[in-house]
Amino acid sequence: MANELLTIVNYMAKERGIAKDALIKALETAMESAVAKDYGSQDDFRLRIDPVTCEIKGFKILEVVDDDPMSDKEINIKDALEIDPEIVCGELLEVESTPENLGRVAAQTAKQVILQKIRQAENDQIFEEYKEQQGEIVTGSVKRFQRNDILVELDKVEGIIPAKERIETEDFRIGERISAYVLSVEKGMNGSAPKITLSRTTPAFVRRLFEMESTEINEGIVKIVNIAREPGLRTKMAVVTEDPRIDPVGACVGIRGVRVRNVVDELGGEKIDIVPYSEVIETYVTNALAPAKGIEVEIDKENPKLAHVTVTPDQYSLAIGKQGLNVKLSAKLLRMKINITKKSDKEHDAFEKQLMEAINNLAVVDGISHSDAEILVKAGFVTVEGISAVDIGDIVELAGITQEHAESIYSAALVAMTS
């Protein structure tokens, strides 16, 4: 058995990269447990495997007494001194006593331990591999659902997207391909597979997607200052560059919007606003609150983290956004509190007159009814130029109308501009 065990141990150490000392120690522990019945308790014996020859020996652990032994767990001092001349009463002595069936036990145990060590070595390797990918994006397939968590089949291992890291509006099917950000990698208990936690909601997922899409961001020419995100709905991302020849927003959008479109597609249609960063805080606040225009910003004198923003009534809904989302994300992006108010009543009365004029001007456009004009103007679309300059999706969201209705209005505005 020693020769066979030696061959196996040497092979595992060389071909599988499992440390020989660790493997022998694991074999000793497992075999001690397997033959415990021969000694009554695992605490009453030890097994030793010679690291050179892999010869196995068993040792009983006996208490040295000065009288006749009262049980098989004791040894008389005279007999003990023949084994260890320095032993004294009350001490424990290891006496060689190898069970007859140790060879059979060794063969069975060796197989189990080696398989366990192989799995542990493979899991350690997987841990190291994915530890290096922490902060990266990985792709796998949906394996199954565990309540609201998604279990993802990755290469050699399973990852998990917890419910809080899922985008609520997304609906995946088993077998469907899915990409996610590696949030954390932890070693498994007792050598089991590592726990890989993935996320599709973290702002870091958006950051990494843009780093992969934009050469300028990846090379550090354009820097992402901050990201504010409401997963599945909208993201605002502030960017800046020190190179005056580079348009930081354009570097994120790409030719014909291909770069930002790829990110939006990966996020299931989540709207993304690219905001140019400015060291002039008033300008930065104005940029962040887009698409609202004509904004007046005043930073609180006592609290530099508070911005007082004044907008005309027609821009108020744009500045606030649907369900307050625009101002909420802007505040998170700026790391400030934003207080938005409308301009004075006098200015408001003057504007009301302009508002009616804008409604009447839109209502004369073929394809835009008077009721359409009222809805559009209240949503901030006061001219055909303004309508044609935005995405149809913005019209749907801000005016609260259907996609088909918005497309009809958008087409009418384009025709009016060219006629």
Image (cartoon, rainbow, N blue to C red):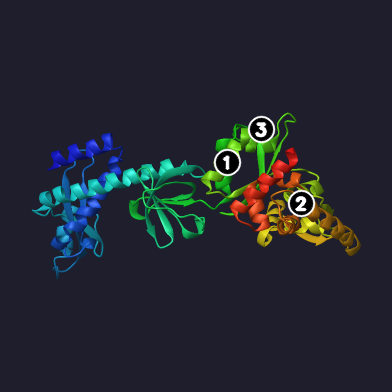
Q: Secondary structure at mark 3?
A: loop
Q: Horizontal and vertical percent for residue 25? A: 27, 48
Q: Horizontal and vertical percent for residue 282? A: 81, 49
Q: Which residue is mark 3?
A: 221
> What quarter of the picture does the C terminus occupy?
top right
For the question of whether residue 282 can be seen, the reply is yes
Q: Which residue is mark 1?
A: 261
235 displayed left or right of 280: left
> What quarter of the picture does the N terminus occupy?
top left
Give the CA separation, mark 2 to mark 1.
31 Å
Q: Which circle's residue, 3 or 2, is located before the other in the chain?
A: 3
Q: Horizontal and vertical percent for residue 198? A: 47, 51
For the question of whether residue 306 can be seen, the reply is no
Mark 2–mark 1 contact, CB under 8 Å? Answer: no
Q: Horizontal and vertical percent for residue 107? A: 14, 47
Q: Looking at the picture, does residue 251 appear above or below residue 61?
A: above
Q: Residues within 10 Å of mark 2 (few under 14, many from 20)?
A: many
384 displayed left or right of 25: right
- Inspect the image, locate mark 3, and give the three-letter code of the amino acid beneath it: Ile
Q: Which circle's residue, 1 or 3, is located before the other in the chain?
A: 3
Q: Secondary structure at mark 2?
A: helix
In the rendered image, which quarter is residue 140 located in? top left
Mark 1–mark 3 contact, CB under 8 Å? Answer: no
Residue 358 or 26: which is nearer the viewer?
358
Q: Which residue is mark 2?
A: 362
Residue 345 or 119: which is nearer the viewer?
345
- Inspect the image, locate mark 2, and give the three-letter code of the amino acid beneath it: Leu
Give the CA separation, mark 1 to mark 3.
21 Å
Tag nearer the camera, 1 or 3 = 1
**Residue at 76% over, 55% down:** 377
**Residue at 27% over, 34% down:** 14
